[in-house]
Each structure stands twice: as structure tokens, then as C-alpha cells.
Image: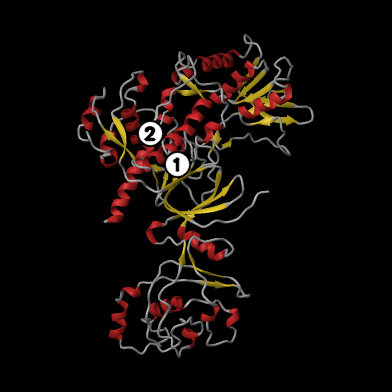
Amino acid sequence: MKSEHSEDTIHKEVVIIGNGPSGIALSYMLSGNVPYVVSTSHPDEMLSARLETAIGQCLINADLEFLSSGLEGRSTNPISLLVDALLQPCADIGLEMDSLIEFRKDGKEIDHVVLGKGPPGGSWHKMDPQILTLSLGNWMSLPGLPFVSRDSGEKRAYASSVANYYVQYVQKMGLSKYFNNNVSVTSIRPVAKAKRHSLENSDKCDVNWVEKLNENDCLSMNGENTENKFKRNIISNALNYIWNRGNKTSYKCCKRPREDQMLHEQSPDRKIREIDLETDHSGEKSNLRYIQPCNLNILCDSNNSNFSSNWLRDKRSRDNSEVPSSYKVTECRCGEDVNWMVETRDLENGTIRTYTCKYVVLASGCNDIPNKLSITMRSEPDWLVYDLRTLESRLDSKTGNCKTNKLDPVLVVGAGLSAADAVIALRGRNVPVIHAFRNKSADLNRQLPENMYPEYHKVHQMMQDGGSNYPLYSSYPEYTLNKLNEAKHTVTLSNRNGQQVELKVSHIIVLIGSSPDLSFLPEEFNIAIKHNQPIDGKTNAVNIDKMNHRVRGYKNLFAVGTLAGDNFVRFIPGGALAVLSELCKKNEVDET
């Protein structure tokens, strides 16, 4: 039986949401592994000349904007292009050259945690293990540990090999202590907002706690109706008094000379913040909101009832001349070290855990939620799926892994590479395929060379041919699925001319892209480049400053990986470096 209880708040300087390649690469660098320029021998003469200014230097201290200027490639992020060009010079044209940078573990370790829903590697563990990567096998490597493909005869790697590599990477590079796997992030919010939320919902744990004061310390000088009034700590009353005593309309109860008042206001003890005390009617529960410990001495006449009605006196002094000078603080992280609160739930036992941190990095990718068709139906039937791995599991259970059992065709909806993977896998099982796609496929020759991706070009030919020359395959170009009959196991396809066709199928697999799960963000957060439109790594990424990957408009919030538009693993280390460089600059400023 799952338990659900709350643990103490844990403070980290950085919380990384997502334990895929992006989160792993950033963790590697935050743990003290930093890149140094060791060579300037690059075929790009302009880049080689710029590198002369940084030879022997650590890249986190280099002028990354200058070094990355003028670079072009399959990423829109300059630092990603720079690090890729240094790690694998001219890889796009097939050259195999030594890296121009090396990582050394002599950087400052930054305390952090990496949160993920599954094992390290993220969505790679959800893919069909027999699918080949788009990238070459060696492009799946992260800094410090080369990826060695054991798939004989294949330049590309199987998804299962890549997933295992990322698990081993975390172990071999000594990063396991930073990873909290099998947890779901339920919410993140700025600390200031979290405090207001906690006051409104006192049953929830807050980041800042003060030990409950003894009820005997709370003395009401005017008992009438005080049990129905909101009780406030003496420091809150004192603060209000000090703030208002210069106002002519405020109550005047202080009899000190004005010069003494000014002298007192210049004291370091003058700098205090409000502490709110919320007590329920039973008096059994009270939450004190602590922001900063303080000392305060006030010499006042307490004849005014408004000032003294809820006066909290220290045990040691009953003459109202001294306010308690200190409180015992539990798990309190105050000031500039805390900007965010991150709440998580353990997917195995339901444990709730809260992190406070200075920086949050979004690294959760864009493959969490499959895109769905807008079809009206009471509920989704179990023969409608959205990923190939689930479909193959259903087929195995239905046929008992016996390929001779005859099945009705499987309808594949989509025109992308994931849909092509499904067509390849189904025909390999001798399962007939009906392939419906809205638009005629683009020319793959511009995207993928045929000598490297023959299987995708084969599917492209089948889509253009219509299936007349290929067994177990028939295509319906420019058709969409608009109806399904659960009782008959049939689907209705229609084209733009209104023509319809009804077909009997065994399963439907819809592969029309996916979206990130950012439900943990506050509703008012609008972080996409195109506001109020869904985030997509290819067409509408998170709106970042491309030099440091900071999310525009949000303090100390960053995004890396596919969320930031880097859709290939080879570009991920650059995003991690951009974040690390910015954090180091911020910390240097804070220390001065």
C-alpha cells in the first residue's frame, strides 16, 4: 500500500527537472567537470583564429559569444553549435578529428539534484528497443565517456543500447548521488508566491518554519473578542508601528524625542521583516512564517489599545520593553539563496518531498504527452495506442508471439519518422498495414541521405506508390481518421473531397508528434516563443536567451535540450555549458 507523507524540505542550489541526456550532461558539469581549450586546429579558419584567444583557458570563463559568432548548423543556439564544433570538428561532413577541448575535474562543485520519472536516460527507455537512432552512434556520447556501439555492422545505434549507455554513464561518472529517479515533479513556483499560498492553505508544508511559541507567551491585554481576531506576532505589530509613526494620522504612543527615534531607525536592528502568525480557533495549530531572524528593542508607552491588544511578550520581560531577540529556525533557507520551491512525489511509495533552490533548470524534453486526434468518443478503446512499444506488446499478447496467426490490418496514422518506424516493425511481423496521412510526405533526400537511412526512404517510396507494389501495405494519402466504431472494430477515413472509406482493423496507432508535460509550471507562466501556443522543440521552443539559456522574463529559470530547441544529443553539452557559465557569473557577483 502506498504511503503519502511529507518529508523535510531539502535545499539545493540547482534543481534540474528531467534526467535525460540534457539533465545528465548538466549534472556532469555542475559536479566540477569543466572544458578547457587544448587545440586550435579546426578546419574552420575563422573559428581557429578565435580559439587563439582562449587556448589553455576554461570555456566557462571565455567569451562564448565571441567564440560562437558566425557558426551555423542544425541548432539555432550558438553555444550548442560551438561546443559541438569543438567536440566533434566537421562531423557533418564525415571527418573524424580529435576533440579540441578536454574536460577536467577541477571546477567548483555546485550542489544540485536531478529529478526524473524513470531511470537516467529519460524517454530513451520508453522507445522501441529495436529502433535505430537518427544520429550516428558516436554522436550519442556525452562528455567524458565515449559511446561504443556493440551493434555489429551498424553505424547507428539501437535505442536499447543508448538507454543502457546513459544509465552506465551516470554510474561511471560518479553522478548517482545527484539523481533522484522515479519521482514526478508536481509543482514549481517562486518562493514569494509559495509563501502566499502557504498562508492561504495552512495545511500544506511551507519552506520557512519557526518553532511554535509557547501559548503562555501570548497575553491578551484586552480580552474582549480577541479569540475571534487574527493574532499577530509582536514583531509584526512593532513593524507596523515603526512604519506608521511618521504618519500624522497614525496613533502616537511613543514618548521618546524624535532624535532618539531617528537614532534607533538607523540601527541594524531596524531591518526586520514581518512574521505572520495564523492560529485556528481551537488554538491547537499555529504556523509562524519566518523570513529573517532579527533583534528589536523598542521603548514605547503601550497605553494605546490598538498597539497593545495582541502584544506578544518575552518570558524574560513582562514590561513590554523587549521583544524576543531570536527564534529557533528549522529547515530555513532565507534571502537570495532561495528563489524557487519544487514539490515532488515518489512514484513508488507516494512520498512527498519539497526542494528549495536558487535556480531551476527545465530539462524534461518534449516527448511526454502524445498528440491526439480530435475524435468524439466516449472513451478510448484499448486497441487505440500512441506508441510502438505498447502496440507490439498488445500484438504479442494477441498472437502469442506466433507470426503465423492472421490479424486484421493495423491502421498507422502519421507521416513522420515514428510512423515509418511503425510501418517497418509491423511489416517485419507480417502484420498488414493501412497507412493514413494528412499531407504528402516531404522529400526525405533533403533531410536524410539515402545511404544512411535506407529504411526510411523505402517507406517513403511505399507512401508515394500507394502500396500497389508492396505486400502487406496500403496507403491513404491526404486522408484523416474521423470516426471509429468500437463494436465493429472499424474506422472511417475521409479526404478533403468528402470521400469516405470504412475499414476493419485490429489496432490503431496514432503517431503525430508529442508535447512536453509542463503541468508543474504555474498556470500564468507563458514561456514559449509564440505566446499562448503549445511548446514544441522544433517549431515553438521555450523563449530563452541564446547566450545563457535563461528563460526570458523569469528570474533564475533556465531551459536546455529539446525544450530549448536542441533536438540532437550532440548539441546538448553546449546548452549545459551555457547554463554553467551563467551560474558561475551570477555566483561571482553574489560573492562580491
Q: Dot 1 corresponds to which residue?
A: 542
- 10 Å crowding of disc 2: few (<14), some (14-19), many (20+): some
Give coordinates of residue 567: x percent, y percent: 45, 32
Q: Residue at 60% across / 55% down in the picture?
A: 5
Residue 76 tag number:
2
- Front residue of 302/418: it is 302
Q: Residue at 57% across / 63% down in the picture?
A: 201
In this rendering, is residue 87 above or below 8?
Answer: above
Give coordinates of residue 547: x percent, y percent: 33, 41
Left or right placement of residue 280 versus residue 560 in this view: right
Residue 505 tag number:
none
- Residue 294 makes an appearance in the image: yes
What kind of element bears circle 2?
loop
> How many angstroms separate mark 2 from mark 1 (CA)?
12 Å
Give coordinates of residue 66: x percent, y percent: 25, 37
Task: Examine the image and state in which quarter residue 491 appears.
Answer: top right
Kind of residue at disc 2: Thr
Kind of residue at disc 1: Val
In this rendering, is residue 60 above or below 393?
Answer: below
Left or right placement of residue 375 versus residue 53 in this view: right
